[in-house]
């Protein structure tokens, strides 16, 4: 009996693509980047001689007021991010443009937070003279590390469905603590001024 090597094989289903399992080591790079960013910011803030001030915007009474209002704007857009994330994941009803709202509110929150962080690092550095300031310094460094990890994970394929909401929630929780130890403290101490 002869066998035709070009004949189609019958009776055997073709093996479909083998599902690849996500290996935990693939999360090592975002974790290492997060640690490097957080430690790098903290180290820079600690060794840098604080300049005292980095910027001021006309119409504001002080640099503290500028930073507090910018931080409040970033916190507001972060709240929009959380609500729009619930819409994207189907936990709240939302319009078809909820994913775009989620992306753009995150971008705006980040862009508004960057000048505040630059001022904090350049003008004040990493401070530890009281517990509120210590926590604010630690959380600020941790925030940008966690944010970096989240951005790297967004581009990963085959993520577990729970991972991005957990990381996003962590980033939001840390930003909330940063706002509480800075802008809210400023408004309670000096009043809601511009």
Image (cartoon, grey):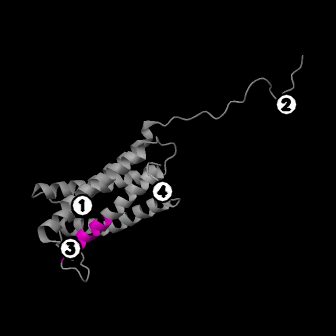
Of the image marks 4 and 2, the number of the one nearer the N terminus: 2
Using the numbered discs, state the Cα–Cα distance from disc 4 to disc 3 in whole angstroms: 35 Å
Which residue has dot 2 on it?
6
Q: Secondary structure at mark 1?
A: helix
Which residue is at 20% across, 75% downward? 63
Please give left or right for residue 176 compared with residue 105 in the image: left
Residue 55 in view here: yes
Residue 53: name its quadrant: bottom left
Which residue has dot 4 on it?
94
Which residue has dot 1 on it?
179
Which residue has dot 3 on it?
65
Using the numbered discs, state the Cα–Cα distance from disc 2 to disc 3 in whole angstroms: 78 Å
In this picture, which residue range is highlighted in magenta?
62-74
Quarter of the figure that contains the N terminus: top right
Eye-nearest disc, 2 or 1: 1
Q: Secondary structure at mark 3?
A: helix
Residue 37 in view here: no
Please give left or right for residue 51 compared with residue 33 in the image: left
User: Residue 99 versus residue 51: which sits nearer the camera?
Assistant: 99
Which residue is at 47% across, 53% downward? 93
Q: Is residue 72 above or below residue 28?
A: below
Q: Which mark is residue 77?
A: none
- Whether the residues at callouts 4 and 1 have beta carbons within 8 Å, the answer is no
Q: Residue 38 location, x and y as percent?
A: 29, 53
Which SS type dominates the magenta stretch? helix
Eye-nearest disc, 4 or 2: 4
């Amino acid at each position: 009996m002869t066998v035709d090597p070009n004949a189609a094989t019958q009776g055997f289903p073709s093996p479909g693509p083998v599902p690849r399992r996500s290996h935990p080591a693939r999360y090592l790079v975002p974790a290492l980047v997060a640690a490097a960013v957080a430690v790098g910011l903290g180290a820079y803030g600690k060794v840098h001689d604080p300049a005292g001030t980095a910027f001021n915007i006309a119409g504001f009474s002080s640099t503290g007021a500028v930073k507090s209002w910018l931080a409040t704007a970033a916190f507001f857009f972060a709240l929009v991010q959380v609500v729009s994330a619930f819409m994207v994941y189907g936990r709240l009803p939302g319009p078809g443009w909820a994913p775009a709202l989620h992306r753009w509110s995150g971008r705006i929150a980040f862009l508004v937070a960057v000048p505040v962080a630059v001022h904090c690092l350049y003008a004040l550095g990493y401070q530890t003279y009281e517990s509120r300031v210590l926590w604010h310094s630690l959380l600020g460094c941790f925030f940008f590390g966690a944010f970096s990890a989240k951005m790297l994970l967004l581009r990963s394929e085959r993520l577990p469905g729970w991972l991005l909401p957990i990381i996003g929630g962590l980033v939001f929780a840390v930003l909330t603590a940063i706002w509480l130890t800075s802008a809210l403290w400023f408004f309670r101490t000096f009043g809601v001024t511009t």
